[in-house]
Amino acid sequence: MEKKIRQVENDDILILGIETKDGIDTGEVLEFDLADIELPLRYQELIEKDKKNKENLKNQFIIIEKRQDVKGKKLLSKNEEDKLKAINDFLNKEVEVYNMFLGENGVQKLLNGRKLGWTSLKQIDEIIEKQIVPYLNISMDSVTEKIIEKYGKATETDEIEVVE
């Protein structure tokens, strides 16, 4: 019996090669399936969870600053230690949130071995906004056009049939 194999076309795959700031290829890539309907939802979830993480960090700082500060175990005061712990927890949560969208180890690939910090979060946001979101928007427009082409445009007079 002869097997028939049909490969899916990769027209809707966005592959971003990662380079150092000097333009040297790291060999790492980020890959996005623009035909994946869940990709925009993951991007939206990234934005929502990022906002929630920042709000949580802000609230933790407010609580810490309202407490009376005491001498810490070593060099830093107790409040300073707690702020650093809060920032560290925040950054770990951010890595999880961004990797949910960028893919497995996406943040680590973009950082090329560096530690995550405030400036690197801004750089990652800029990469997403300038290099990924435009393709995401084009893909969503394309999907919408394909749906309209196949099923027609819904109008206000179209009735929705409920099947019981």
Image: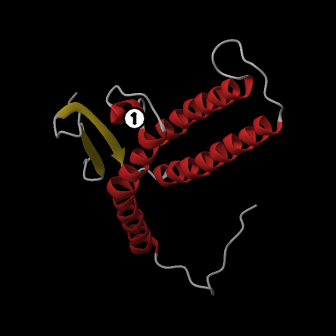
Name the residue tied to disc 1.
106
Question: Which residue: 29% across, 48% down?
Answer: 13
Report the amino acid beneath label 1.
Answer: Gly
Residue drawn at x 40%, y 45% is 124
User: What x and y, as percent, mark residue 74?
Assistant: 65, 12
Q: Residue at x 32, y 39 (%)?
A: 30
Q: Position of residue 67 (x, y in %)?
A: 83, 33
Give the x, y percent position of residue 113.
Answer: 34, 25
**Residue 58: image x %, image y %?**
69, 45
Q: Quick check: can you spot residue 82?
A: yes
**Quick one: SS at disc 1?**
helix
Q: Quadrant of residue 59?
A: top right
Say left or right for 162 vs 153.
right
Q: Residue at x 67, y 28 (%)?
A: 80
* Location of residue 155 with respect to 34 vertically, above or below: below
**Residue toward you, 47 or 126:** 126
Nearest the camera: 59 or 152? 59
Q: Quadrant of residue 22?
A: top left
> Eyeballing the image, is 39 above or below 94?
below
